[in-house]
Amino acid sequence: MADLPTHTIVFEILTRLPAKDVGRSKSVCKQWYALLSTQDFSSTNSCSVRPIISNNNDYGPSSTVTFPFHHQNNDVSILSHLNGLLCVCLNHTYELLLWNPTTTAFKRLSTPDSHGFYINNLDAIGLYVDADDDYKVLHIKRRSGVLGVYVYSREVDSWRNIPFITRQEYLSPHFNWSAGTFCGGTLYFTVCECWIGGTNVVICFDVNSEQFKEISFPPVPSNGMVQGVLVNVKNVLHMFASTGMFEMTIDLWTLQGDYWIKVLSCPPIPPISLSLWCDITHYVTNGNWFVMTKLGKLFTIEMDMKPFECFYLVSWFRGFKGAVFVQTIVSPSI
């Protein structure tokens, strides 16, 4: 410890303090003020959590959750969530972590042999629970035209490779893989080609047999942008499928067997900037369909049918900056 510079010791201590205490520490001396004004401390060491209140269908007062791990400015991306656990990536190191924001417990998934490192726009992540109640992470990696699929087990705390047979073209960066949505013993991924009129499919991973298969996308028009966002509703897979360019139309579909059945359509919605689309969250309750961003409600769609009795939410695109989670005490490690 005596060999460590004082600056290093102070930095390691301050990065572990709650955000409020870090802010107060700026008044200690000029050196601390300069250190705490650097990029490493320019954002808070915490994130905001806002509940959705069922009786008025709006956000409640926000609270703060402190990150229990070191991170840099705007560095934590949320990739997947299940039963109160979040799988996140630290963008400056590419490390994957399992984190429970309620208990603050976390587990680093990276290993010396290069497992557990995530690259944005190339990789895909899915959280699931198998028949033995083992929480697992499926990591699909695309590296220089080579696809690798790996499974992390919480119970044995290790990664292993599994085979994946699919079309070679899906290895191309022209295809965007969604995060996995766990439903009925299967992880589902949308795989969409990144141009108008491209190929769109759904890849299914049976979590017990560890077999993959491909099913079709809902039959939506392909004369504009096509986006499919999956959500588990009462253990039945649904998809919010949007099409269009400047005006978007959103349809809600449900999966029956290997085929999609349209549940409802909404009228064309007003033009929304792409920056807002990237932050959109949908939720349905009490016969209304709400479309929201972090800034608040954009609009409400009244539905003729009421298939939902409580909140079911889905983040637009991959939800890098946020996720919906329930508060549990599920541990990221055993």
Image: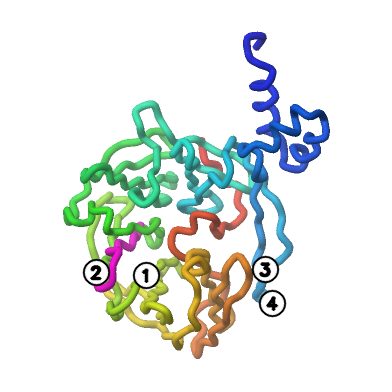
Amino acid type at mark 2: Gly
Residue located 53% across and 80% down the image: 289
Q: Position of residue 212 (x, y in %)?
A: 24, 55
Res. 5 image quadrant:
top right
Which label was assigned to residue 59?
3
Q: Is residue 261 magenta?
A: no
Q: Is residue 193 magenta?
A: yes
> At which x and y percent is residue 29?
81, 28
Quadrant for the N terminus, please.
top right
| Tag in front: 1 or 3 | 1
From mark 1 to mark 4, how far is it between C-alphas? 29 Å
Q: Nearer the viewer, residue 317 or 99?
A: 317
Packing grade of label 1 (10 A; few <14, some 14-19, many >=20) is many
User: Looking at the image, do the residues carrying marks 2 and 1 touch, with CB atoms under 8 Å apart?
Assistant: no
Which amino acid is tagged 3? Tyr
The structure residue drawn at horizontal position 75% and vertical position 27%, both measured from the top left corner, is 31
Specify start and end residues of the magenta stretch as a single range: 186-197
State the separation of the CA atoms marked 3 and 2. 37 Å
Residue at far bottom of view: 304
Near mark 2 (Cα within 10 A), the count class, few <14, some 14-19 or many ≥20, is some
Q: Of tags 1 and 4, which is closer to the observer?
A: 1
Residue identifier under label 2: 198
Measured in 3D between alpha carbons, the distance from the residue under mark 1 to the one under mark 3, in whole angstroms, is 26 Å
Would you name the residue on which mark 4 appears? 56
Q: Which mark is residue 227?
A: 1
